[in-house]
Image: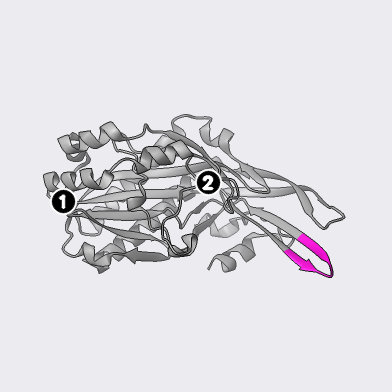
Amino acid sequence: MLKRLLLPLCFVSGLSCAADPGTEGLAYSPAVVGISNAGDLKGVRKVAVASFVVQYVVKQTEDLVVDFEPPLTADPAYLQRLTEKMYGDFQASVKAAGFELVPHATVVAAPEYKTMQGMSSPSPLLMDGWKMGSKTGAYKSLFYAPKDLVINLKDDYEELRKSYGGFSSYVVDETLTFSGRIAQYATNWKYHDKDLQKALGASTLHVRVFVPIAYLWSSQTKGGGWTHFSAGAMAAVRLGERFTRLAVGKDGDVAKIYLTEPVMTRGATEAQLIKESTSIFGKVTREVNYTLNADAYQTVVPAATKQTLEAFLGKMKENI
């Protein structure tokens, strides 16, 4: 799926750009969904949204840099408005899917939830994460939650695929700083979440939406005694498959519904090649101007998120 999406969006040279939406308007690919611990969903009818976190990547770095921090943060309320819209859309989707939804005001007023609020990181939470030797590059992110909801990034609620960690499914979240990981992983959200489930008489929903701003890659090939290096970046907003998920807490157990492929978008970003040069060793260097259409971004990101979370709820209904 990813390769099929890249081809129409990229320059043949390896530099990439988002396609002109043209007559088709803004577009995003379908959500491809996986699930783990599906048996824990049996009997779920009444639910409460306990956390809803959107991770907006504002700067992404590997061999090339895509930096949209200025346009995304110029208006301090811009990303909060987007977050509140996505949260409102999700609440409506939960009801439309046939689940009984505990009102937001009831959730945040519960003593058990106030305990969770006292342990939460502030929103927005800034993380400028980098790990030496990382194959995924560096991410500067702002994590937002709707008003009064906690920021829960604990790995208990992540579907980190075994292919990422070899013999173990545990993978460090490289988008967080070391101190950020400690702060999140040291909190026993699962324990307190079980108390909240009992108090509300409902299962809990924990949403995380991961919004990178580019697809970056690097590689090298050898031939005839020469080594050729290549690198590229596609300035296309996407929902990342590693962290975009819906976790469902029930009686202390957790079922996880997640993307198995990234949701790609077009129309919100573009890249313009300024200059390209090749060294005597075959390494290509490119100077690229990446731009963000903020109006398109605030349309396509909520729309792609709504589609994705509705697909998650559909998978949830299939297993109750």
Q: Quadrant of the C terminus?
A: bottom left
Name the front one of labels 2 and 1: 1
Q: Tell me the kind of residue under disc 1.
A: Ala
Q: In which quarter of the view is residue 242 placed?
A: bottom left
Q: How many marks?
A: 2
Give whichever of discs 2 and 1 has the lower sequence position. 1
Provide the major secondary structure of the magenta segment. Answer: strand
Tell me if mark 1 has few (under 14), some (14-19) or many (20+) residues whose alpha carbon lies within 10 angstroms of its own.
many
Please name the residue shown 85% across and 53% down the image.
279
Q: Position of residue 49 (x, y in %)?
A: 25, 46
Q: Is residue 141 visible?
A: yes
On screen, residue 135 versus residue 176, left or right, reads: right
Badge 1 element: loop
Point out the stretch of residues depicted in magenta. Answer: 221-228
Residue identified by numbered label 2 = 296
Please name the residue shown 16% across and 58% down the image.
45
